[in-house]
Amino acid sequence: MSSSTSGQSRSATCTPSHAARELGLKRGEFDLAVHLGLVRTVPDEGGGGTRRVERSEIDRLRAQEDHPETLRERVRVVGTAEGAALMEIPVGRFSRLARLGLLVPVKWYLNRYRAVVWLYLAEDLREFVSDSRNAHLLKGRTPENLRGQLDAGVDLRARNWRGRHLGFLLRQAEDPWVRAGAVAAFLSPVEIADVVKDPYERACLHRFRPAPPGQGAPGSPAAHLVERITTAQDADEIEWLRSDLAHVLREARALTPAPRPAPRSAAAPVRRAAARPIPPMAPTVTRPVAPAAPASAAPRDNPSAPEPRPDRSEPAGEPVSRALAWHGAPVMRAAAPPARPQRDNRRGERAPSRPTRGLRAWLRRRSPRPARL
């Protein structure tokens, strides 16, 4: 569809909120009118699962006699006390009829005390009173079989509401996956997983599963109460919903399979080069180093260069020992002085020991002194 055609179709429709204002209804009354089929809607061209109201439908409803009072009266809801007054019966009898499933609620909400308030269509209550077959239920003693059910604790209000609300959802569903999501909305996740084995189908089902009408903070008492009301409890009801879900799923699979991720295409094998051995490293060729010539034999290229300083690293006693050996005197090495405790680690090596005074005197006596002039 072209953009111009889509723009024209959207201009010929309006949102539910705008339609409710033009019809003179509250949003809750408008939603109930849509559920009852009093206001026809169409799917939104833009997608997203929303619905819109055509301008022609609004004009049709506004052209009716006594609009909007007639439409508002058809969607009027009442509680227990107001419904009992409408039917002219005691409140207790009205509650017993509702628990027995003879009066079907159309809406409900939680009050500030977290008590469930059931609402009934005023039009349904008037029809119940006008039916002559229900006259014995409005007056006199309750039949014995019904009293036995009440003593057993039967309360069919939640179950009847679930069945009625499911009919509302199926009336608006046009796609088989939307119908399947409407049925799954009243089953627990465990029951859904038992019926729908495929995880992709469960994901598609969850996408079209409508949210419950009442919400609460996750894990709160209100949320648990909403879950108990909107989830099937009886075994026969659960079995009926499971079979209905399996039937609708078969239709949905045949028409439109659930979307799945695209299969990965087989990639061509990557051809890698064959591994080659690493050649050994070539030996490093260096120039041979000539041995250093002695300092005495090496010619002096620069006569002005200073004489190399003698190595100071030899011990101080070596010259004395060589001198004694040259004169033929016995070599006597001085004993090393006792080691002193090192006071500072940053000092270098200790100085070499000096020759004793007796050895110096002996050397003076051996060498003749030059004569004084």
Image (cartoon, rainbow, N blue to C red):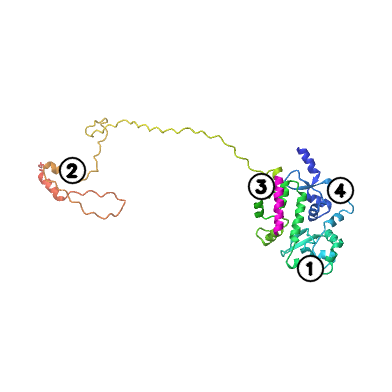
On the image, the x and y values in percent for residue 198 come to 64, 47
Give the residue type at disc 4: Arg
Q: Residue at x 78, y 43 (%)?
A: 10
Quadrant containing the C terminus in the rendered view = top left
Q: Are marks 4 and 1 in contact (CB under 8 Å)?
A: no
Residue 181, x across and y down, in percent: 71, 50
Q: Residue 333 location in percent, x, y?
A: 16, 48
Query: Badge 4, how many Cα within 10 Å: few under 14, some, many 20+?
Result: few
Q: Which residue is mark 2?
A: 319
Query: Is disc 4 in contact with disc 2, using a CB cutoff of under 8 Å?
Result: no
* Whether label 3 touches label 2, CB < 8 Å: no
The disc placed on residue 60 is 4
Give the alpha-carbon distance from disc 4 to disc 2, as whole Å.
135 Å
x 12%, y 47%: residue = 362
Among all residues in the image, which is located at the extreme front? 145
What residue sits right under mark 3 in the picture? 201
Q: Is residue 87 in sight in this rendering?
A: yes
Structural distance between the alpha carbons of marks 3 and 1: 48 Å
Q: Which mark is residue 144?
A: 1
Picture quadrant of residue 85 = bottom right
Q: Determine the secondary structure under disc 3.
A: helix
Which quarter of the rendering shows the N terminus? top right
Whichever of labels 2 and 1 marks the residue nearer the N terminus, that label is 1
- Residue at 80% over, 45% down: 13
